[in-house]
Amino acid sequence: MKCAVIIGVIQMLGGIILSLLNHLRRKDWRHVWFGFVPEFVFLSCTFGYMGLLIIIKWITPWHNTNLAPSLLETMTNFFLAPGVVNLPVFKGQAELQVLLLLVAFSMVPFLLLAIPYLEYQDHKRRVAEAESGDAAHRDAHHEQELSVLPAPREADETDALSAESADDGGHGGHFDFSEIMIHYIIHTIEFV
């Protein structure tokens, strides 16, 4: 059972590292800093710590196995009663567990909020740029109309373009912040 836990933690770390390689290849620094780093820290502070406890318990000689700490009880108390360690594996374990739990839970807001907020800011910037670009395009088009009368066919094309841009909000695609938040809420719940 303990070997399966260690193998599972290694597999999860491997998956996170593969996602890091994908983000680095795409130069997606947003997902490196606000996806990979919080996931890695959270996993290391919780299940990585549990794997470390398993290894320490394996290599520690216990003269009386009744005095050996229960890892199930230790990890249950890690989440439900921080700072309570009935049979410590090493000195300072209770304080370390509180610190690891605080660090792990401090990563949750980054996983949940950082990327959706940054994507929302990017969308607002793109909308502002598109609106300023549309205004410059309208001004240039208006000056052109004053110098040369447009052919009726050009007016039809302009109407078709404005109808197309009205379908997507006029700014290069559909953006729904609630969908993005739901995606990251589900991702955070699955990960944590």
Image: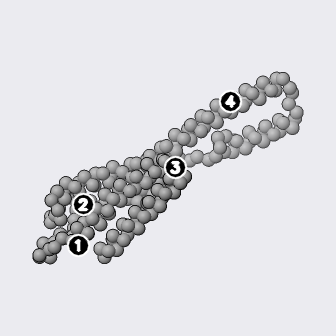
- 154 horizontally vs 28: left or right: right
- 82 horizontally vs 136: left or right: left
C-alpha distance separating marks 4 and 2: 58 Å
* Disc 1 versus disc 4: nearer the observer: 1
Q: Earlier in the sequence, mark 4 or mark 3?
A: 3
In the image, is residue 8 above or below residue 45?
A: below
Residue with the mark numbered 3: 28
Residues at marks 1 and 4 touching, judged by CB atoms closer than 8 Å? no
Q: 48 or 186: nearer the eye?
A: 48
Residue with the mark numbered 1: 58
Residue with the mark numbered 4: 135
Q: Residue at x 69, y 29 (%)?
A: 136
Q: Position of residue 2 (x, y in %)?
A: 29, 74
Q: Position of residue 120 (x, y in %)?
A: 52, 42
C-alpha distance separating marks 1 and 4: 70 Å
Which of the image's four quarters has the N terminus?
bottom left
Q: Which of the 4 image quadrants contains residue 140?
A: top right
In the image, is residue 14 above or below residue 167?
A: below
